[in-house]
Amino acid sequence: MLYDSVRCLPRPLAARLRALRHRALLADTGRIDFGDLARVRPVSHGYGFSRGTPVDRFYIERFLARHAADIRGRVLEVADSRYCREFGRDVERQDVLNAIPSPEATIFGGLGNPGTLPDDAFDCTVITQTLQYVFDLQAAVRQIGRSLKPNGVALATVPAISPVVMPTGKVLAVHSPLDP
């Protein structure tokens, strides 16, 4: 219950949270349980999909909508073609890069492995929430650059904070090649 969990918070913040809850209840939107705000574990390990659209996807989709005119010609997307189908304009050919075989994949391999992508092939690459998983980030960026045609566009997003979760559920800490 919110009233029980905010007692440990500073009074102004606790009062603000109580007011927010009160307004939500008055608006007939249902009960809001903010949970334990002092917790160190995520509410959900599924990146928020269990509760609807994750916050990062809202901003990714807004970014892609603003750049929809660039998603044209021969397009490469990582994992699947969802965003190219949704935001693409005049897409002549759709390629999908995946490290493991999948029904949609037309190119197999990793971005950090030289020679995975053909040179001067794409008018646009859509690389969302992927680069943080590439060990050799510099090699991946070079490969993406080489794969673009002249005046080609790379639309890429990376998270500010994201856990790396193994299939076993174990959370790993990751050292970024950009760290000093």
Image: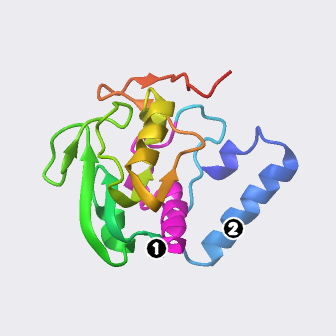
| Helix, strand or loop status at disc 1 | helix
- Does residue 164 appear in this view? yes
Q: Residue furthest left?
A: 103
Q: Which residue corresponds to the image point at 52% horizontal and 38% vertical from the top-left?
A: 162
* Vertical arrangement, residue 16 with respect to residue 172, above or below: below
Q: Is residue 43 on the magenta stretch?
A: yes
Please state the horizontal and vertical placement of residue 106, each as a whole percent of the image. Answer: 18, 51
Please state the horizontal and vertical placement of residue 109, each as a whole percent of the image. Answer: 25, 36
Asked which colour scheme the image uses, the reply is rainbow
The local crowd at label 2, few if under 14, some if 14 to 19, many if 20 or more residues have their Cα within 10 Å, is few
Q: Which residue corresponds to the image point at 69% horizontal and 72% vertical from the top-left?
A: 23
User: For mark 2, what is the residue?
Assistant: 22
Please state the horizontal and vertical placement of residue 46, each as a whole percent of the image. Answer: 39, 44
Please state the horizontal and vertical placement of residue 9, each as a whole percent of the image. Answer: 78, 41
In the shown orientation, is residue 168 left or right of residue 28? left
Residue 27 placement: quadrant: bottom right
User: For mark 1, what is the residue?
Assistant: 68
Span colored in magenta: 42-67
**Mark toward the viewer: 2 or 1:** 1
Q: How many marks?
A: 2
Residue 167 placement: quadrant: top left
Give the distance between the C-alpha atoms of the residues marked 2 and 1, in whole angstroms: 40 Å
Front residue of 164/39: it is: 164
Q: Amino acid at mark 1?
A: Ala
